[in-house]
Image (cartoon, grey):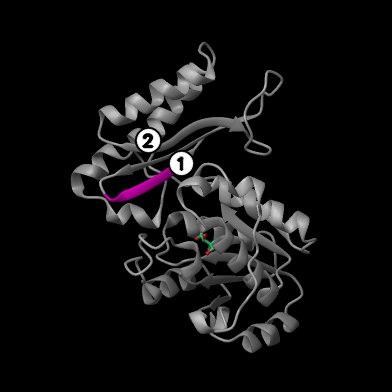
């Protein structure tokens, strides 16, 4: 596996390789990321993964400084997957000191995680746009656990006519249903036992949608989570195509949830 840290190295590598698949990550890789690499391999001759803990997508009181940085282990895992290249840029490579441009995807960034994490999706869209411009991939893969993030990136790619195909890969789960996440490592032993309830509540809500109003489904899901110790950020049913409020004619829905267990914020969807 080749390791690159500069943009010029990536550009030279890119010229030699006709079809490239790209998996952007913030590292601390788990089985969900490795699944993205496997899916990427099916879609291109070469696969490149970036590992970059992007400062602009963290709020002031969030976990940027403590976010797990496990580069050596991450590179070993990628080698084992036969990944072709890894891009490990510094913050200075991605953000020059006089950078003045931000990519902001207005509407779809507003609700859910966007409402509770001000500026988060501007940070995501900006870094993903920069990484797309550096790597110039034919195809890029993202996990669907971050469903709103995927929707924001799809909207950016459409609006800016970026020449990249996007693939959303289904969430990989632990055997008890907990969605894989780099932040699961923050959970205490007791919180880890409670955490799968988030997915169970999503499943119950899906079942309840057959017989109850959306508002009742949301209310009982929130109490179900609060009863076991979650502090719920949001639990909402939305239209899957644009994350807007559901109307009578909609039948393609998504249930989105974010909730805190102690200091750990978990998100999931169904
Ligand atoms: O999902 C992530 O890990 C990050 O938000 C991403 C897409 C790599 C951008 O920093």
Label of residue 198 in the image: 2
Image vertical order of residue 195 relative to residue 208, above or below: below
User: Helix, strand, or loop for circle 1?
Assistant: strand
Label of residue 173 in the image: none
Circles 2 and 1 in contact, beta carbons < 8 Å:
yes
Task: Where is residue 133? Give x, y as percent.
Answer: 70, 73
Image vertical order of residue 252 relative to residue 83, above or below: above
Taking the magenta stretch, the answer to whether it contains residue 5 is: no
Which residue corresponds to mark 1? 268
Image vertical order of residue 113 relative to residue 236, above or below: below
- Ligand 1 has an atom within 8 Å of the beta carbon of the residue at disc 1: no
Taking the magenta stretch, the answer to whether it contains residue 266 is: yes
Q: What type of secondary structure mainly makes up the magenta span?
A: strand
The residue sitting at 57% across, 83% down in the picture is 96
Task: Where is residue 44? Give x, y as percent.
Answer: 70, 65
The residue sitting at 47% across, 54% down in the picture is 32
Horizontally, is 30 left or right of 96 in the view?
A: left
């Amino acid at each position: 596996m080749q390791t690159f840290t500069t943009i010029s190295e990536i550009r030279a590598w890119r010229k030699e390789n006709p079809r490239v698949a790209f998996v952007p990550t913030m590292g601390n890789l788990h089985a969900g990321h490795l699944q993205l690499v496997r899916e990427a391999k099916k879609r291109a001759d070469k696969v490149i993964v970036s590992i970059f803990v992007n400062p602009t997508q963290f709020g002031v009181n969030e976990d940027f400084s403590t976010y797990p940085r496990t580069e050596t282990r991450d590179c070993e895992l990628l080698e084992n997957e036969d990944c072709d290249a890894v891009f490990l840029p510094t913050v200075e490579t991605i953000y020059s000191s006089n950078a003045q441009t931000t990519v902001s995807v207005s509407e779809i960034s507003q609700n859910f995680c966007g409402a509770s994490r001000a500026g988060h999706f501007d940070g995501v869209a900006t870094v993903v746009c920069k990484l797309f411009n550096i790597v110039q991939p034919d195809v890029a893969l993202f996990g669907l656990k971050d469903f709103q993030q995927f929707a924001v990136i799809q909207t950016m790619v459409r609006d800016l006519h970026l020449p990249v195909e996007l693939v959303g890969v289904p969430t990989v789960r632990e055997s008890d249903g907990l969605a894989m996440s780099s932040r699961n490592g923050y959970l205490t032993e007791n919180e880890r036992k409670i955490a799968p309830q988030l997915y169970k509540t999503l499943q119950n809500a899906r079942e309840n949608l057959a017989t109850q109003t959306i508002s009742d489904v949301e209310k009982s899901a929130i109490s179900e989570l609060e009863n076991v110790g979650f502090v719920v950020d949001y639990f909402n049913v939305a239209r899957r195509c644009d994350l807007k409020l559901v109307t009578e004619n909609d039948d393609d829905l998504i249930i989105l949830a974010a909730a805190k267990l102690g200091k750990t914020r978990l998100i999931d969807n169904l």
